[in-house]
Image (tube, coloured by chain):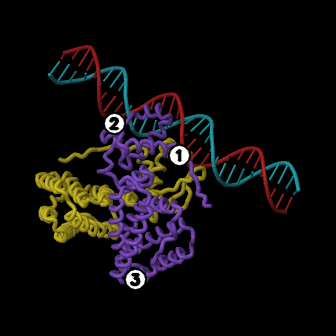
Chain colours: A yellow, B purple, C red, D cyan
Amino acid sequence: MELREIVAPTMKELFIKEIEGKILSGEWKIGEQLPTEREMERKMKVSRTIINSGLSELAQNCFVEIIPRKGVFVGDYMRNGHLNTLISIMNFNGGMLDRKTFDSLMAYRLQNDCECAHLAALNRTDEDLKLLLSLYEKINHTEDIAEIAQLKLDFQHAIYCATGNIIYALVCNSFKQLSLLFAEIIYRQPDSKKPTLNLLDLITAIEKKDAQEARNIMHKIITMRIEELGQSYFCHNFPS
Amino acid sequence: MELREIVAPTMKELFIKEIEGKILSGEWKIGEQLPTEREMERKMKVSRTIINSGLSELAQNCFVEIIPRKGVFVGDYMRNGHLNTLISIMNFNGGMLDRKTFDSLMAYRLQNDCECAHLAALNRTDEDLKLLLSLYEKINHTEDIAEIAQLKLDFQHAIYCATGNIIYALVCNSFKQLSLLFAEIIYRQPDSKKPTLNLLDLITAIEKKDAQEARNIMHKIITMRIEELGQSYFCHNFPS
DNA sequence: TCTCCTTTGTTGGTCGGACCAAATACCACG
DNA sequence: CGTGGTATTTGGTCCGACCAACAAAGGAGA
């Protein structure tokens, strides 16, 4: 009998979701002008404080473009959007991505993670190695599936950090929210089981600074994980 | 005699800059609690509307963590930050990055752009090709350096899009703001000249769907560009 | 009729004062 | 020592108001 924390959404979040929905559903077209803040205030029964702040956040994610003293317009989020935008899109679809986007995402991760394993093997410090090992231990000694998901993300982040290239670490974080959403979806399913992992080989390769080997192992791991992920993710038929 | 548009910063932007400064300078340490919104209102002479909205934006960039009814705390932006965070850091340093971060950034771009060129050659459609060609024409027929910078970003985005993988396009956008900042810095220098480009070979390779050739040419282009960039960027000695 | 200037209204940005609910700190009571 | 109530603190939200820049409408002058 698992219980999960429930959190009440704030008015601002609800407002943002509502507007995002209008835009992502296509009800409001790109370039179109939104109702004025005052009109939204009247119609939606929320204060202008929320409207103004919410629109500002939507603008950050490229869903709207705010032109002071002129109006707010639907933005070209597909053209200008970044990774956060994708999270919004995914949430809009109830945590689901269509098959093509899913495959794109996994292809990118495959490419990137392998490169990271390669670089990590070349540049890792002893501290990096220690962190990886301790995370590996934790993963092995944990039964709670949700916790393992979090630890796996930490492990991944640790590898990205071990590259010695901060940009990789930052990009990794950009994907983190996305990965968390995936994990949540998958581990919510009743038949989800503890994933099989063979991280030790990877750690060994990184320890030996064998870059090519690290890349190969990572490729194997990710491929397998994508396999598992795809199966759980698309087990319920979803409009693709 | 070039004149550039001047835009008055909003109160919110000023507030955010101020708080970011406190954090990035290390004056406020990670985990430390910020003054309450009401106290900031008194001390900084701005309304709580700005404070609340600004803190919310800072939270998005991982500079602070807001815990309702408890307080606002300095976030671990180095650990949790994403690419937007880097832009803030760069702005804090007057548009400058230290040498290590700069090199990391360029290494990432080199790796990624080459992969993109490869994929673009494999997956490009005729429309993609047409767009690339028209952008190339525009670049050649433009003298204004700032405009060329923008066009080059569009060109780059077009290549990322031509991969057929939307994730690459999104990642490209995540870097766009960063690239714009670079362009601005560099083209502000008096001796900046029209960059030499050999994009036509790249387009040809993509047209012929010669993936390996596209990758090689991209590698050459980026390496050259990094060379130029590094020279202009670090010409005035900067604390590294 | 056309041009230029003034007026008026719209719009996002900002303000300040207020109330709410949850978390916390404190204190009396058993 | 533990329990439960109470006052305070804090971010979230609301309301009504003013500001400045922009746009459209209207009027004066050529």
Q: Separation of disc 3 and disc 2 at Cα?
A: 55 Å
Dot 2: within a 10 Å radius of its alpha carbon, few (fewer than 14), some, or many (20 or more) residues?
some
Q: What amino acid is at disc 2? A: Gln
Kindly indicate the quadrant of the structure image that contains residue B198.
bottom left
**x, y percent for residue B40:** 44, 34
Callout 3 secondary element: helix
Q: What amino acid is at disc 3? A: Ala
Q: As rendered, which of A14 and C26 lies closer to the eye?
A: C26
| D21 left or right, relative to C6 | left
| First-in-chain label (2 vs 1) | 1
| First-in-chain label (3 vs 2) | 2
Specify the subunit that label 3 lies on: B
Q: What amino acid is at disc 1? A: Thr
| First-in-chain label (3 vs 1) | 1
- Residue located beneath label 1 in the image: B10
Q: Do labels 3 and 1 share a chain?
A: yes
Specify the subunit that label 1 lies on: B
Q: Are marks 3 and 2 on the same chain?
A: yes
Q: Can you see residue A211?
A: yes
Specify the subunit that label 2 lies on: B
Dot 1: within a 10 Å radius of its alpha carbon, few (fewer than 14), some, or many (20 or more) residues?
few
Dot 3: within a 10 Å radius of its alpha carbon, few (fewer than 14), some, or many (20 or more) residues?
many
- Residue located beneath label 2 in the image: B33
Compared to B133, does A114 lie above or below?
above
Q: Separation of disc 2 and disc 1 at Cα?
A: 25 Å
Kindly indicate the quadrant of the structure image that contains residue C21.
top left
Task: Looking at this view, name the residue that lies furthest to the bottom.
Answer: B208
Q: Are marks 2 and 1 on the same chain?
A: yes
- Residue located beneath label 3 in the image: B205
**x, y percent for residue A47:** 50, 41
